[in-house]
Image (spheres, rainbow, N blue to C red):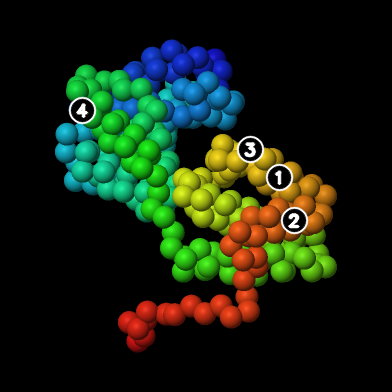
Amino acid sequence: MALIAGNLSREQALSLAGQFLTERFADADFAFVAGSIMRGTGTPSSDIDLVVLHSALPHAHRESEIFEGVPFETLVQDEGTLRWFLDTDVKAGRPVLIRMVMEGIAIGPRPQRADALRREAEALFVKGPPRLDREALDRMRYVISGMLTDLADERPAFERIAIGAALYQALGDFILRSNGQWSGAGKWLPRQVTAFDPGLGDAFIVAFDVLFREGEARPLLDCAEQVFAPHGGLLFDGYRAEAPAEWRR
C-alpha cells in the first residue's frame, strides 16, 4: 500500500528520508530534512524536502522523485553552491532555502558542518532582506497602481481574475518589502503578511477571497488604499523612470 506523505509522522518522515539518502545519495555527507511534514502541517499532497550536501560538486542540481510512494524534492549542493543560493534568497527577499537550512533536521553519515551552516542561515534570516530604496518602492507602487486602476473599471469576470492574480503577489510583496520584511510566494505570502500584521493579513486574505469568489473588487481596492496611504497613495501623475544609458543596441 502506497504511503501518503501528509499522513507520515515527523519520525516516520525522518526514517524514510534516511533510507532515501542512503539509497540515492550514498556519497553525500548529510542532508537537511525540511518542509511542511517536519513542521507538522503536512497535507495528502505534501512532499519531503531535502537539501543534500556533498563535499564538492561540479554544480548544484535539483531532483524530484517518488520513493516508497512518497514524493521527494531534493536540492543537491555543496557548501559553495549552497551559499550562492542563500545569497540569491537574500537578493530576492524570499527566504525559501534559508528556511529549509535553518529549520531542517540534519541526517546522514557526516553532519559535522550542519550546525555551522544552520547558524549562517539563521544569521541571514535575522538580518532580513535588503531595504528597498525609494526608486524601487515607487516602481512597485506605480505598477500596482495601474493594476488597481484597471480593476476598478467594469470588465469581464475573467479579466478581473487575471488582474487579481497578478495583484496578489505584487501587493503582498509591497506590503512586506516596504516594511523591511521577508516576502513569500503562493501559500506563504498571506502567512507572511499575517505574521507581520495580523489585522492587515486578515484584510488581505478577505479582499482576495471576495474578489476571486464573488468578483467584488471594493475590499481589495480599500485594502490597497490602506497599504499605500503612508507612501502617498496611488502613483501615476509625475512618475518618471530612467533607463540605464547602456540599454541600447
**Which quadrant holds the C terminus?**
bottom left
Query: CA separation, marks 3 and 4?
Result: 37 Å
Report whether residue 151 is seen: yes
Q: Residue furthest left?
A: 56
- Whole-Å distance between the Cαs marked 2 and 4? 49 Å
Neighbourhood count class around disc 3 (C-alpha, 10 Å): few under 14, some 14–19, many 20 upward = some
> Disc 2 marks which residue?
222
- Which mark is first along the chain, 4 or 3? 4
Residue 149 versus residue 97 in the image, above or below: below
Q: Position of residue 226 (x, y in %)?
A: 68, 55
Q: Amino acid at mark 2?
A: Asp
Which residue corresponds to mark 3? 198
Instruction: Give left or right: position of 126 versus 3.
Output: left
Q: Quick check: marks 3 and 1 in contact, CB under 8 Å?
A: no
- Going by the numbered disc 4, the residue's amino acid type is Arg
In the displayed structure, does residue 81 sit left or right of residue 47?
Answer: left
Q: Is 66 above or below relative to 245?
A: above
At mark 3, the secondary structure is helix
Query: Quick check: can you spot residue 2?
Result: no
Location of residue 115 in the rendering, given as x and y in whole percent from the top left corner: 26, 26
Secondary structure under tag 1 reads helix
SS class, disc 4 = loop
Q: What residue sits right under mark 1 in the picture? A: 203
Closer to the camera, 111 or 194? Answer: 194
Image depth: mark 1 or mark 4 in front? 1
Cβ–Cβ under 8 Å for marks 1 and 2:
yes
